[in-house]
Image: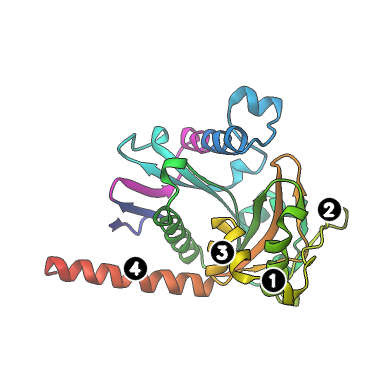
Amino acid sequence: MTARSDRPVSIRVGDLELRLAESDEEVEAAQALRYRIFYEEMAAEPTPEMAAARRDFDSFDPYCDHLLVIDRRLDSGAAGVVGTYRLFRRSEAAARGKRFYSADEYDIGPITEHPGEILELGRSCIGSAYRSRAAMQLMWRGIADYVRHYDITLMFGCASLPGTDPAAHALPLSYLGHFHMAPDGLRPRARPERYVEMRVLDKQAIDKRAALAQLPPLIKGYLRLGGFVGDGAVVDPQFHTVDVCIMVKTDWVTGKYMRHYRREDAQARGATGE
């Protein structure tokens, strides 16, 4: 594994490289990957403009950082993009006069009142051939580096369960609502016109193991990092999903990942006699 300090994120693990997009071409490659996964694989509904371009894009993309997983066996640039995550910092939103994407679904006032730099995460996807726990850990390593570089105190975003029927997710939604609700001072709430009650099952009736098994890997990853959810789910008809708002305080995330990789680096130095 190699890393350099001149970029917010710069990691190599074998043939995979993790870094931020550095050109319009690389951002468009990330958008094309998002299109293939969200609209072709997961059957979201593109706008006519997206369908013509075969890219997923919106008004937020020009103002965000785009974290890329690149398979250098395919290409060292745009043609090798096999994973992506969209990152939007408060300082960039304020400078551009933009609100956060999540504000369309949630009242995020409690989040925006949090002191320090905050980060919205979104549009996460990775190619089917690369969907392993190791790949997700690599992505989280990159996010931890990014958080550390910009001194981010809180990250948040909408995470999705497949389909538009909340009743089909009664068990995992109830589990999240009963056991992982954010504290009052940090709790966003779904907008009234979109609010879906999460806690439809009694707390005593929840099988935690079964509920966890029904959660998508991304949401389970957030929970492993100490994540909380907001109050209420939201149905997203364009993406055919049921969304929850998740937030993570970053001090534990960076500590966990930095300790892990310091141990790994120390072991590597020991093996080479450095």
- Residue 19: image x %, image y %? 41, 49
Visible residue check, residue 160: yes
Residue under numbered circle 2: 194
Q: How far apart are marks 2 and 4 (CA)?
A: 41 Å
First of labels 2, 4 by sequence position:
2
Amino acid type of the residue tagged 4 in the rendering: Tyr
| Left or right of 203 in this view: 246 | left
Amino acid type of the residue tagged 1 in the rendering: Ile
Q: Which mark is residue 120?
A: none
Q: Which mark is residue 222?
A: 3
**Residue 265 lies in magenta, yes or no?**
no
Amino acid type of the residue tagged 2 in the rendering: Arg
Residue under numbered circle 4: 261
First of labels 2, 1 by sequence position:
2
Q: Distance between the residues labelled 2 and 1?
A: 25 Å
Tell us which disc is closer to us: 4 or 1: 1
Residue under numbered circle 1: 206
Tell us which disc is closer to us: 2 or 4: 2
First of labels 3, 1 by sequence position:
1
Q: Which residue is drawn at 73% across and 77% down?
A: 204
> How many neighbours does mark 1 have within 10 angstroms: few (below 14), some (14-19), or many (20 or more)?
some
From the viewer's perspective, is residue 118 above or below residue 203? above
Visible residue check, residue 152: no
- Residue 208: image x %, image y %? 62, 71
Q: Give the range drawn in magenta.
A: 14-30
Q: How far apart are marks 3 and 2 (CA)?
A: 23 Å
